[in-house]
Amino acid sequence: MQDPPSAAELVRAVAAFLRDEALPALEGRTAYLARVSANTLEIVARELESAPAADAAERARLLALLGRDATDRASLLELNAELCRRIEMGDIDADTPGLLAHLWSTTLAALAVDQPGYSGYRRALDEAPPERLLPPGP
């Protein structure tokens, strides 16, 4: 039995076709749209590959920051909304242990999907102290 290609592999194959086969044969606006489409598909592939782990790590950091139990069923969206409310109310601020590490890690995870070749992202990975990349402790 053969393993089927993953969704990310399928998306990358279409992106490669657009970039390597279709794009050289196109001109003007159509070439531009093919390039945008290939780039969009690459973003989708990176999202498919990294989202489960990135979301789980973000969720764990949010639960710790908000003092919630790991069995909490709140969605990532709900947890982020609560974090925003608590920051707005002044209950959580830059001095809260784990907040800056959480924000830094969440930003890096987003850039890994959206702009992995961005020089600022690459530099941040090289320069980031390890404790900023780890979820806060209990």
Image (cartoon, rainbow, N blue to C red):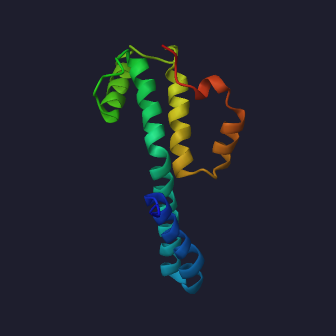
Comparing 5 with 85, the one in front is 5
Number of labels in the image equals 0
Question: In the displayed structure, does residue 82 sit left or right of residue 39?
Answer: left
Reply above or below: 85 against 108: above
Question: In the displayed structure, does residue 36 sit left or right of residue 24?
Answer: left
Quadrant housing the N terminus: bottom left
Comparing 71 with 66, the one in front is 71
Q: Position of residue 9 (x, y in %)?
A: 50, 62
Residue at 49% of width from left, 50% of height from top?
A: 49
Residue at 48% of width from left, 71% of height from top?
A: 14
Residue at 51% of width from left, 69% of height from top?
A: 13
Residue at 47% of width from left, 39% of height from top?
A: 53
Quarter residue 52 falls in: top left
In the image, farthest residue toward the left: 73
Q: Position of residue 112 (x, y in %)?
A: 56, 46
Q: Position of residue 124 (x, y in %)?
A: 66, 37
Reply above or below: 100 against 38: above
Comparing 63 with 124, the one in front is 63
Comparing 28 with 104, the one in front is 104
In the image, farthest residue toward the front: 1
Reply above or below: 46 against 36: above
Q: Position of residue 18 (x, y in %)?
A: 52, 75
Question: In the displayed structure, does residue 79 sit left or right of residue 51?
Answer: left
